[in-house]
Image (cartoon, grey):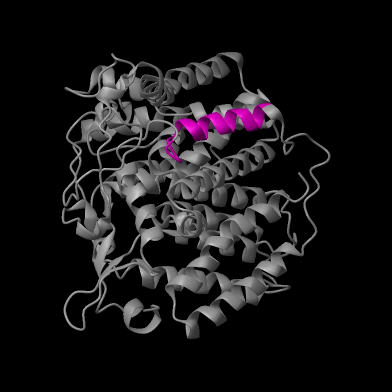
Amino acid sequence: MKHLHRITVLYLTIPFIIFCMGWLRLSVAIPAAAIILWALWQLLKQPPADHSTHHASRITFYVLLITALWTLLSGVGGYAFQNWDHHWRNAVLHDLISFDWPVFYSQPESGPVKMLVYYIGYWLPSAGIGKLLGWQAANFALFLWTWLGVVLVTLHFASVLKTSPIKAILLLIFFSGLDILGTLFFAREYPTLFPPITHLEIWSGNLQYSSFTTQLFWVFNQAVPAWLCIVLILESDGSSPVEKHAPAFQKIFIWSLCFFFAPLASIGLLPYLLIGLIKQTDFKSPFKNFHWDILLAAVIIFLLSSFFFTSNTAAQQRGFQFLDLKDFLAFFLLEGGILWLLLAPIKWRDPNWMVTGVLLAVIPFIQLGSGDDFVMRASIAPLFHLLLMTGEIIFQKKVPRLLLITYYLLLLIGSLTSLYEINRSVYRTFDYYFVQDESECECEVPPVVTHLEQGVAPEAEHPGTLTADEIVTLKFMDDQLSKNFIANVRQSLYYRYISSR
């Protein structure tokens, strides 16, 4: 696919341009958008990478089919069962369609100014279509947008691994920690091994390193763009599609976009970015042929995103949590530590291997923002690098046979996590379309809710329906989780000096 890199950069940049025009006052939006578009042009006009020498970037029918089925079963678009988190994600899309941009829930002359402050970038293209054509069109556009993102991830990942896209996407779908063992030996009441549709990820309570299938099925809006940013930076560590003598500006630009879409994931990605910059910088002439215009665009993306996100005080909560040593060791070893240690004989000199182990060991102790999102999202980058290193080993097969068999055995055991997620979606979707009586459907318009608690097991969520649409709008929400989405922004720098009103 000749223009793979260009399409991916456009895919990541377009939502931020929309954000500028909808969320910033024109005196800020126009110059910011102009600089970013100029930087985008500088990136796109570079000669595309030549993928003709291998088949890694070719799209086949089977690649499209597998990625489409995976995206479909994630619940994106509402065509298959949606897990509990979709209550909030559907509400964000609803409000982006129903309210003017930026989304204010109350804007009195004095007192709290309540506003939607969240990682909204991923929904903006679909929400724009929804404003013109309605809710169903927005969901279809969101499905296509997500499917395109998954296809792009697959092609880039295959290129990095130097293998076929089918092998790359299957590894991405089924790669996971040993949650089945955690459930068997450490879980108390939930999850359980039977029925095989439970959410195995939560066997360790508030600690979770989500599999890539779980990330897509629960937090697609952060997962897909984060994956894309990671693989773009990984690609530029090898033969970059842009100028080989100046890779730094491209990496920084991509990282700033990751921060816009998924700030917690970008924190986990930052050490790898720094390693790549150090490895590829010529310290004798570090600024030779450096694109200051692209660096300026990256700084603008980062600063504008920071001002917007920090206007929500929930994002400013930070601290450390203390863990029992036994619980930590069980979590670390089962959620990637064993696999990481087995990679040591081959990868011990690789700084990315060292950073991956350090991050997987340290992240559980850090709390940033409300809830446990930091552990689940900051781990995306180290888990992706663990996935990459494992893929290199099993596809190149340059290790002793016994060690290779051990890798395959661990991957097989770990794949049960993804299979449980997929099986839950298949079970509930099949039940909805082919088993359930129409009389069982809870089809009435849901009441306006102010609180939403996850009180049942994920497989028993919103019985009788596919979609998680209990939150009609975030406007009336008044519980702890809603603080991740709604903020009083009156005293923030964003509202006072940058926001469109």
Q: Nearer the viewer, residue 215 or 182?
A: 215
- Which quadrant holds residue 390? top right
Magenta region, residue range:
62-78
- Which quadrant holds residue 218? top left
Figure check: 20 above or below 176 = below
Left or right of residue 359, residue 465 in this image: left
Q: Nearer the viewer, residue 451 or 389?
A: 451
The spot of residue 339 in percent (x, y) is 46, 28
User: Looking at the rendering, in which quadrant would you find the C terminus?
Assistant: bottom left
Left or right of residue 203, residue 137 in this image: right
Residue 71 falls inside the magenta stretch: yes
Residue 14 falls inside the magenta stretch: no
Q: Nearer the viewer, residue 311 or 439?
A: 439
Q: Nearer the viewer, residue 11 or 81?
A: 81
Q: Main secondary structure of the magenta part?
A: helix
Figure check: 402 above or below 175 = above
Figure check: 13 above or below 371 = below
User: Looking at the rendering, in which quadrant would you find the N terminus?
Assistant: top right
Number of callouts: 0
- Is residue 343 something that shows in the picture? no
Q: Residue at x 25, y 38 (%)?
A: 444
The spot of residue 471 in percent (x, y) is 26, 48
The spot of residue 276 in percent (x, y) is 59, 55
